[in-house]
Every structure is written in structure tokens, then in C-alpha cells.
Image: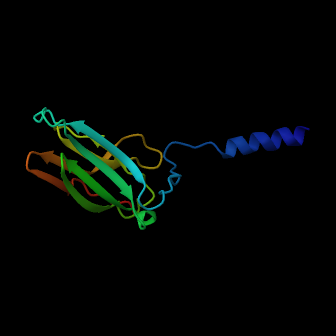
Amino acid sequence: MKKLLFATLALFAACKNEPGNTTKSDFTPPKSGTTVAADSVLIEEDKLNHQYFAVTVIATDSSINGTYDIEAHWGFNMAVNTIRMPIGGEHFEPILRRGKEPYSFIVGFHFDNDTAFHEYYAIDGQRGQMMMKYVKAYTLQ
């Protein structure tokens, strides 16, 4: 009985995650075509048509390698682009947050054991145009 108790305690001690140690994320991309993240905001200037600025992050056949499709909708207009997560960060889950501007969204990620949001890709919309661009670069290797 003492051996079993000692083995159990040793197992729990071995599982302790010290600060600074990183482990790989458990995120596994879903099958192609599945929505990974999405958000929308009502276009205040167009109260008559009740339209939205919406952004969706969609898994692709290459999401296991960190590639995702981005769909942005401004009312009836649509823009599509493909992003690639940073090299060395292919296992990161894309996270969608609202940006600082009224019609902007940021795709980012968390490092393995970190809770801070790391901005990576911006999607901005306004009447007549949408813009998508990388906002930061990361070296992870």
C-alpha cells in the first residue's frame, strides 16, 4: 500500500508544470470547411438594411500546417484570403478578437502556456473597402 501511495505521489510531482516550461498545445484543427472562430458587428451607418461586418476563420485541408481561410463580409460584399500561422506555431489555435477601430478584428494566438493575446493578422472594414494584413511577425524556432 505504501508503494502505491509513493508511486502516486511521484506521478503527481512529475506532472507539475513549472513556469517557463512549455508544452505543445492540444489544439487539433477541425476538418476542412469548419469554422474555427467568428464574430460580427452591426454596421451602425446602415440602419436601413440592418447589415453586419463579419469575419470568419475557417479550417482548410492544410490547417494541420497552420493555414486557414479568412472570410470577411461587409453587408453583401465578401473578401476571402488565406493566412499562415507563424513557422513553429502551426499548432496554435487562431483566436479572433475585436480591434481598436469600430470595424476591425484581429486574428491572434496564445503561446503554449501563456494567456496573453498575441496579435498576428488584422481585418479592417469600412464603407466601400475591406483590408486584410499581417500586423506582426514572430520567430518561434
38 left or right of 72 in image: right
Which residue is at the front of the view, 46 or 141? 46
Which residue is at the front of the view, 61 or 86? 61
Q: Residue furthest right?
A: 1
Q: Quadrant of the C terminus?
A: bottom left
* x then y, percent, for residue 14: 68, 46
How many discs appear? 0
Q: Quadrant of the N terminus?
A: top right
23 left or right of 46 in image: right
* x then y, percent, for residue 7: 81, 44
Q: Name above or below for residue 84 compared with residue 108.
A: below
* x then y, percent, for residue 11: 73, 45
Q: Colour scheme of this structure image? A: rainbow
Q: Residue at x 27, y 54 (%)?
A: 71
Q: Residue furthest front?
A: 48
Q: Residue at x 11, y 36 (%)?
A: 46
* x then y, percent, for residue 136: 24, 54
Which residue is at the front of the view, 59 or 64? 59
Which residue is at the front of the view, 61 or 119? 61
